[in-house]
């Protein structure tokens, strides 16, 4: 039985070495044909995709002749090379619409998913959302205890918090104090996931707290695969509709000015479609939670006797794209407006 499909045109150089091999006998139809039937009328050839499909059929034939074929190998070997080329041409429109991920799904019925291209960097794979930890699920409990303590010490002024949409959002603030994540979360009245320095995340006695808030540890000293996993967790949270906070400076300021912005948040935002919201935190430089050389809890207590420290949390409009230069300029404009 043959497929009854007209082979799509393809460059002769791309198929000549393969056509020299004897075509195996046709054993049956592969499951992918019915899925690709709606695009059979598309005239566009796909020489680039033809090679992976032909390669899959060739390897399947070798495994079949070796005497221990898998089910996928039997089905793949059932497609003669000319018909496999037609299959590649038919799948071209679907690949153009769905990208490399669709290519993987098209090759999966052949039993050779490993031959398909890997997921593009920065694009979240549609997996189940990461389970939310306790305090992230019960944010009101955490807010009930944290909000009065913050108001006791700081007079917080919040500007344009409505610019953070109800759905997923990536927030990129400056980093002045250890209390910045709490201030941003209280200002927007919503739970958030934070990328935080692994050295702080793993502090004895505090790790349980950070884990219960769903913080994502990361460090430039981590192996590359660990860094990729941390960035992927942040992307997956955005894809699940959560709000994620990434501090582009990567560390607390030690002089009150901005540190250079790093490009990690660009990779987190890539492929998610989530808006990137710049935020400026003002008034925390010199507090007990900052890196100010004179900062101490005793000094903070004495200042408290004069009144609460005035702090501002200002939200800017969403960036046109995730870019370090745009983010730094936007945060700098918010800082000038706060003065």
Image (spheres, rainbow, N blue to C red):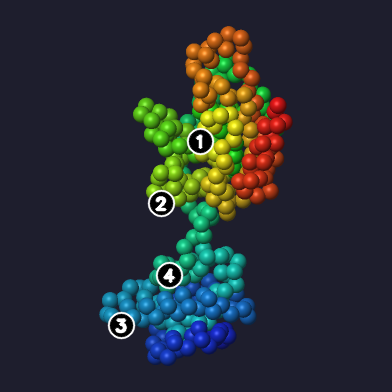
Q: Which residue is mark 1?
A: 251
Residue marked by disc 2: 225
Q: Nearer the viewer, residue 21 or 219?
A: 219
Q: Position of residue 106 (x, y in %)?
A: 49, 70
Q: CA–CA distance between discs 4 and 2?
A: 21 Å
Looking at the image, tell me whether mark 2 or mark 3 is earlier in sequence order.
3
The answer to whether mark 2 and mark 1 are in CB contact below 8 A is no
| Vertical side of 45 occupied by 191: above or below | above
Q: Is residue 291 left or right of residue 165?
A: left
The structure residue drawn at horizontal position 42% and vertical position 91%, both measured from the top left corner, is 20
- Foreground mark, 4 or 1, reads 1
Residue 208 is left or right of residue 241, and the answer is: left
Q: Residues within 10 Å of mark 3 (few under 14, many from 20)?
A: few
* Real-space Cα separation, disc 2 to disc 3, in angstroms: 38 Å
The reply to whether the C-beta atoms of the residues labelled 4 and 1 are less than 8 Å apart is no
Q: CA distance from mark 4 to mark 1?
A: 41 Å
Q: Give the image location of residue 46, x and y in percent.
A: 56, 77
> At numbered mark 3, what does the secondary structure look like: helix, strand or loop?
helix
Compared with 157, 225 (above or below) is below
Image position of 33 (left or right of 330): left
Q: Local crowd at mark 2 within 10 Å, few (<14), some, or many (≥20)?
A: few
Name the residue carrying label 3.
65
Residue at 67% in and 36% down:
332
Q: Earlier in the sequence, mark 1 or mark 3?
A: 3
Of the 4 image quadrants, the one containing the C terminus is top right
Marks 2 and 1, Cα distance to the nearest angstrom? 21 Å
Closer to the chain start, of discs 4 and 1, is: 4
- State the CA–CA distance, disc 1 to disc 3: 59 Å
Q: Which residue is mark 4?
A: 115
């Amino acid at each position: 039985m043959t497929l009854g499909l007209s082979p799509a045109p393809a460059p002769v150089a791309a198929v000549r070495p393969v056509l020299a091999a004897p075509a195996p006998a046709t054993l049956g139809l592969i499951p992918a044909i019915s899925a690709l039937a709606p695009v059979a009328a598309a005239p566009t050839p796909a020489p680039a995709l033809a090679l992976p499909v032909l390669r899959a059929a060739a390897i399947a034939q070798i495994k079949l002749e070796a005497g221990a074929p898998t089910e996928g190998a039997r089905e793949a070997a059932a497609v003669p090379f000319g018909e496999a080329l037609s299959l590649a041409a038919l799948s071209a429109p679907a690949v153009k619409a769905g990208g490399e991920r669709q290519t993987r799904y098209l090759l999966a019925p052949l039993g050779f998913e490993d031959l398909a291209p890997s997921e593009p960097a920065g694009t979240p794979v549609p997996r189940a959302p990461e389970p939310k930890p306790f305090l992230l699920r019960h944010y009101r409990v955490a807010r009930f205890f944290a909000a009065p303590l913050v108001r006791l010490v700081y007079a917080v002024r919040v500007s344009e918090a409505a610019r953070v949409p109800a759905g997923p959002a990536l927030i990129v603030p400056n980093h002045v104090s250890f209390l910045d994540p709490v201030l941003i979360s209280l200002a927007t009245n919503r739970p958030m996931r934070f990328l935080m320095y692994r050295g702080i995340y793993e502090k004895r006695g505090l790790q349980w707290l950070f884990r219960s808030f769903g913080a994502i540890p990361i460090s430039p000293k981590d192996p590359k695969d660990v860094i990729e996993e941390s960035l992927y967790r942040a992307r997956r949270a955005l894809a699940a509709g959560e709000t994620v906070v990434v501090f582009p400076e990567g560390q607390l300021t030690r002089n009150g000015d901005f540190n250079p912005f790093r490009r990690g948040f660009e990779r987190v935002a890539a492929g998610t479609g989530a808006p990137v919201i710049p935020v400026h935190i003002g008034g925390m430089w010199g507090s007990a939670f900052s890196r100010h050389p004179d900062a101490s809890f005793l000094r903070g207590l004495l200042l408290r006797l004069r009144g609460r420290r005035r702090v501002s949390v200002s939200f800017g409009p969403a960036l046109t794209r995730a870019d370090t230069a745009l983010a730094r300029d936007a945060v700098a404009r918010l800082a000038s407006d706060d003065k």
